[in-house]
Amino acid sequence: MTLPTIARALLRVRLMLGLASARAGAGIVLAGALALCAATLWLVVMPTLAARVDMQSRDIARARKAPPPKPVVTTPAMAAARLSAFYEALGDASHSEQIVAQLFDAADSTGVTLDKAEYKPARDANGRFETYTIILPVKGDYAHLRRFSEKVLLAVPYAALDDMRFRRSSASEQNIEANLRFTVFLRADSGEVRR
């Protein structure tokens, strides 16, 4: 249908309603308009709604018949894989002297003064791993201390930088005295079997 055709049809309906209202009462016109609306709903809206309801009913029936999706990885398997990855990422406690050598190498290569280090070993019985807390009193400017920290964390990926404390003797002093606290996480040296 084109727009002029629709306009002509509406004009005819209007004229008929106008004539009918002139001949009959307003009640008949109102009843005719309601009957026209009901016919339009019955012929246009109801088939569309019925088709939509049928389509949704088919979708629901298909979804009910489909088997439930299976998880790609079971929760216990995922937990075991994560635990295994954790233990593989730990350093080896039997080679802790190499860690100390890497700390001093990082200090030498970045221009940071490192004279001594404090070590505090600990064991996490529940986690079945060992830790070494290493406190390093270092001296250097901020850029060197930052490069040193980055180099240590890259060279010892199983280490964490837990704390940094800075002190300067005066505002004009370029060198900073800092205490850096690293924690190194290591596999137990005892050969204990992990589950």
Image (cartoon, grey):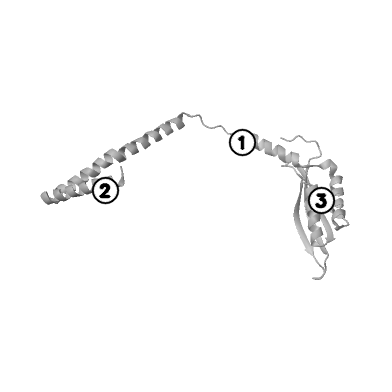
Q: Residues within 10 Å of mark 2 (few under 14, many from 20)?
A: few
Residue 168 placement: quadrant = bottom right
Q: Residue 30, position in %: x, y?
A: 18, 48
Percent x, y of residue 50: 34, 36
Crowd tier of the residue under label 3, counting other residues whose Cα lies within 10 Å: few below 14, some 14–19, many 20 or above: few
Q: Amino acid at mark 2?
A: Ala
Q: Is 61 positioned to the left or the right of 110 in the image?
A: left
Mark 2 vs mark 3: give the one in front. 2
Secondary structure, mark 3, is strand
Between discs 1 and 2, the one toward the N terminus: 2
Q: Nearer the viewer, mark 1 or mark 2?
A: 2
For the residue pair 159 and 30, the one nearer the viewer reads as 30
* Helix, strand or loop for disc 1: helix
CA gap between label 3 and label 1 equals 36 Å
Q: Amino acid at mark 1?
A: Thr
Image quadrant assignment for residue 39: top left
| Quadrant of the image containing the N terminus | top left
Question: Is the residue 141 above or below the residue 90 in the image?
Answer: below
Residue 75: mark:
1
**Circles 3 and 1: CB distance less than 8 Å?**
no
Residue 7 is labelled as: 2
Q: Residues within 10 Å of mark 1 (few under 14, many from 20)?
A: few
- The residue lying at 87 percent from left, 54 percent from top is 108
Q: Position of residue 145 (x, y in %)?
A: 80, 58
Q: Residue at x 24, y 42 (%)?
A: 38
Residue of label 3: 120
